Image (cartoon, rainbow, N blue to C red):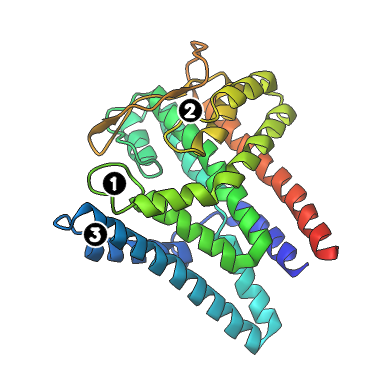
């Protein structure tokens, strides 16, 4: 029950507070560690094999330190007082969730689009996506944001929920370390192709099941929110593997179908054109901020349903 209570309180805190930038945050520390390791271990003069080994070492150090430090902190806190352990554990759990902050950033982009500030919207979306954004149209900015919210419904909410409910804040933070490694070095360009290979592959592995659970939860959310659940199911079934990643299209395909949008397609990353497949049918529908709001609603709905279902499963397993 302690873990369930931690996760429940953490979800409430996330919905109320989001992620205040001035607050101490373990994911920021993980990001600083990855940056430092990358600076010292991703040497362009090294061979491809050496860079792969260095990337693997970066993964081991980052995930290993995350587990050791968070586990040690919780052990020490519980040694001092179980109440202190619960408070720190709940805070660490809260830092693993990011629905509200993602919604805040997406809503900022929507407001900039609606007020005609395309340059600002391009800059804002560039803060949450990996692609080049300086030439994007207003519609392309909206689609990029929709894709990010859809994908992060899995990476930022459902997957952390699963790992938190299985192993508490330590396993939740370990997952966030794996995910942060992929988001920072798991690219296919010349700089990171070899160095980030381990990070990208292992992120695919740990997100395999969460992506498919998110697919189902988004379908349920589509039905409850009265979007086009039939199209969501059709496109979700057909296009769920239409991505360079084996997991990302699962959530994006359901959202694309539910909202009658065509997502994906070729995009520029670090000045290089990456030919991604399209996700969804071309309904000739212009993507607007209304679609962005609907995607956020689907994310929240999937998160709530996910907590209820996964929480009940954990309670039954522990009780049994």
Asked where in the image residue 43 lies, by quadrant, the reply is: bottom left
Pointer 2: what residue?
A: 242
Q: Is 221 in front, or is 102? A: 221
**In percent of the image, x 67 and y 86: which residue is there?**
81
Q: Are marks 3 and 1 in contact (CB under 8 Å)?
A: no
Pointer 1: what residue?
A: 193
Q: Is residue 13 above or below residue 150?
A: below
Where residue 21 sits in the image (x, y, percent)?
44, 59
Pointer 3: what residue?
A: 50
Q: Secondary structure at mark 3?
A: helix
Position of 107 with respect to 235 (left or right) is left
For the C terminus, the image quarter is bottom right
Q: Is residue 233 above or below residue 171?
A: above
Q: CA separation, marks 3 and 1?
A: 12 Å
Task: Look at discs 3 and 1 and give the one toward the viewer.
Answer: 3
**In percent of the image, x 26 and y 42: which residue is there?**
189
Q: CA separation, marks 1 and 2?
A: 21 Å
Q: Residue furthest left?
A: 45
Q: CA separation, marks 3 and 2?
A: 32 Å
């Amino acid at each position: 029950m302690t873990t369930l209570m931690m996760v429940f309180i953490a979800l409430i805190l996330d919905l109320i507070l989001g992620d205040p930038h001035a607050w101490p945050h373990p994911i920021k520390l993980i990001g600083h560690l990855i940056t430092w390791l990358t600076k010292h271990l991703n040497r362009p003069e090294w061979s491809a094999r050496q860079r792969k080994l260095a990337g693997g070492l970066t993964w081991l150090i980052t995930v290993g330190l995350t587990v050791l430090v968070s586990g040690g902190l919780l052990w020490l806190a519980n040694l001092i007082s179980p109440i202190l352990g619960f408070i720190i554990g709940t805070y660490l759990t809260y830092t693993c969730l990011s629905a509200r902050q993602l919604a805040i950033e997406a809503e900022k982009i929507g407001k900039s689009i609606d007020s005609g500030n395309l340059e600002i919207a391009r800059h804002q979306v560039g803060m949450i996506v990996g692609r080049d954004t300086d030439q994007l149209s207003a519609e392309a900015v909206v689609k990029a944001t929709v894709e990010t919210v859809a994908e992060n419904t899995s990476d930022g909410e459902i997957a952390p929920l699963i790992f938190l409910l299985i192993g508490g804040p330590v396993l939740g933070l370990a997952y966030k370390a794996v995910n942060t490694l992929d988001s920072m070095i798991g690219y296919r360009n010349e700089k990171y192709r070899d160095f980030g290979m381990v990070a990208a592959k292992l992120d695919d592995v740990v997100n395999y099941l969460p992506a498919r659970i998110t697919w189902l939860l988004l379908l349920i959310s589509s039905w409850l929110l009265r979007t086009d659940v039939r199209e969501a199911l059709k496109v979700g079934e057909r296009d769920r593997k239409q991505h360079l990643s084996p997991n990302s299209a699962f959530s994006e395909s359901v959202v694309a179908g539910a909202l009658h949008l065509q997502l994906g397609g070729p995009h520029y990353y670090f000045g290089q054109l990456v030919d991604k497949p399209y996700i969804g049918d071309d309904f000739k529908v212009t993507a607007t901020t209304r679609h962005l709001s609907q995607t956020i609603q689907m994310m929240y709905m999937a998160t709530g349903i996910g907590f209820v279902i996964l929480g009940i499963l954990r309670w039954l397993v522990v009780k049994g």
